[in-house]
Image (tube, rainbow, N blue to C red):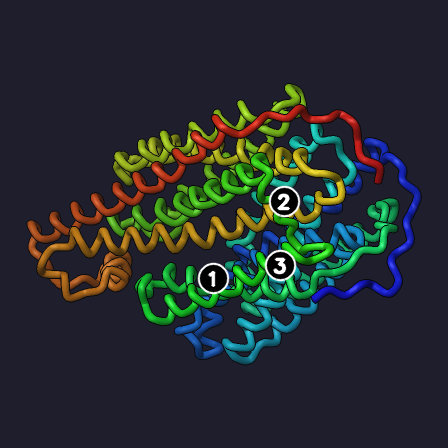
Amino acid sequence: MSVTPSSPPAASQSTTLTDREIRKVVAGLMVAIILGGLEQTIVAVALPRMAADLQGVQWLAWVVSAYLIAVAVSTPIYGKLGDLYGRRAMLSSAIIIFLGASVLCAMASSMPMMIGARILQGIGGGGLLSVSQAIIADIVSPRERGRYQGYISVSFAIASVAGPIAGGLLTEYLSWHWIFWVNLPIGLAAYMISQRTLVRLSRPSIKRSVDVGGALLLTAGLTTLLIAISRVGHGTHILDSYNVTLAAIAVVFMAAFVWQEKRAAEPIIPLVLLANPIVAASCVLLFIAFIELIALTILIPLRLQMLTAAGADRAALQLVPLSVAIPAGAYIGGTLMARLGQYRNIQLVGASMVPVSMALTAYTDPTATGWVILFTTLAGIGIGLQLPTSTVAAQNAVAQRHIGVTTGLASFSRSVGAAVGIAILTAALFALLQSYMPATLTELSSAETVRQMIEGQLPPLSDAARAVLMSSGEKAFRHTFLISALIAAISVILCLRIPERALSEKRPSA
């Protein structure tokens, strides 16, 4: 089903922005990116208090997953709508949806209400992230985009580091409600800045249809698939009957989506984009990069807490260098891309660093903090090198009219990579723990064993049995890291095969 807008927006005059105007636009976009990225991390510290107040501990994990799923589903749709109606209108609507949902989250009186509000908030957050990156492609030449994408990565890093700290302080000294109220002043600032700085962006003057049927089928298919994946990451068996049913429903919806896109006059995701080898390879690179990012952010602190007496604070400190290394790598990659006018060799260097670093981490003692930080920093730089190069490579491979949906696909690949990474790695770790577990502890589930090892509540064990338990845990983590290294090696093969296309120095008309 397709409907046509009754009154297409009028076109504005096409002009090229000056360097000063571009900097103002990017500064405004960084505020929007921080707003969307902050909400992915600020909630984590407040979850236990929130679940206790709303009496829904069993729904705890879905407060985070609901937001991530909604972000993943909405990014390609926002990208396409931005191509049809203009980025300024889509960014403004995303901010308004995000702020309205933040108010609902702050006023939630039950966990189901909270999860519903988080879904709505994720829809707005997906627009903030994808539309902001597409705007950069609208105003900056392909050769310059890498440097500005590096600034976006810095915004993500600020949000990632500030989120848990701000969430902890607000929850401790005010209440968890304030982690949502704080979005209002930031969001209003982002709205006013975007309205002022984006006024010269052109709006499409060509009347084009909206593929409503494709959008609905894509939303239904991706949502059911990501719910199934998230359930695996939350500890349910991959072949659980409910998971299998969800996967089957997702396949039906996605098959119907492909059929719809082939016949739609203006498909929500033109399938020809997925046939483009540069776009396809870039999306896979981003997908794998975020699997590796999740591997590091989950496995590093979890291994330290399970196998040593370290607390959550010390475990979190081991991730601080990673949060700095990724934007540093992104900045370096973007700067090199601007100077050299190419992306494949930069991608190849970054992709090669990650599997080597993950393999070295696998054989490093978790208490050897210096070595762990060194290897995770190298992995973070390698991941960072791939982020702006892959996004810009995909944008550079398509016509300007497809920039928005292509950027949405790139953002979608990152979000799905994070969701799939959680499911794959936690499932692998749990299975390996169960396989290597001493016979005296086989009556416990692997998830329960993880919890009790972290909390120090395992049943009394002899020194020999405890040594076996620690050895089993070390082997499980080592092999999980090696699995992630093998996944990362796929990126090296892709980088060797991805075509190189010269990056233009000509700026698009705004």
Question: Could you tell me if the residues under marks 3 and 2 are in contact, i.e. CB atoms within 8 Å?
Answer: no
> Which residue does the numbered mark 3 point to in the structure image?
74
Residue at the (21%, 44%) spot, across then down: 475
Q: Nearer the viewer, residue 250 or 48?
A: 250
Q: Secondary structure at mark 2?
A: helix
Relative vertical location of residue 342 with respect to residue 189 in this rendering, above or below: above
Which is closer to the viewer, label 3 or label 2?
A: 2
Q: Residue furthest front?
A: 263
Task: Please tell me which of labels 3 and 1 falls first in the chain.
Answer: 3
Q: Nearer the viewer, residue 344 or 54?
A: 344
Which is closer to the viewer, label 3 or label 1?
A: 1
User: From this viewpoint, is residue 13 visible?
Assistant: yes
Residue at the (83%, 46%) spot, across then down: 197
Q: Secondary structure at mark 3?
A: helix
Residue 251: mark? 1
Query: Callout 1: 10 Å neighbours few (<14), some, many (20+)?
Result: some
Q: Nearer the viewer, residue 173 or 390?
A: 390
Mark 1: which amino acid?
Val
Mark 3: which amino acid?
Ser
Residue 403 coordinates in the image, percent (x, y): 71, 43
Task: Please tell me which of labels 3 and 2 falls first in the chain.
Answer: 3
User: From this viewpoint, is residue 185 visible?
Assistant: no
Task: Please tell me which of labels 1 and 2 falls first in the chain.
Answer: 1
Find residue 39 and report its image quarter.
bottom right
Q: Where does the N terminus fall, quadrant-wise?
A: bottom right
Q: Where does the C terminus fall, quadrant-wise?
A: top right
Residue 45 coordinates in the image, percent (x, y): 47, 60
> Which residue does the numbered mark 2 point to in the structure image?
272
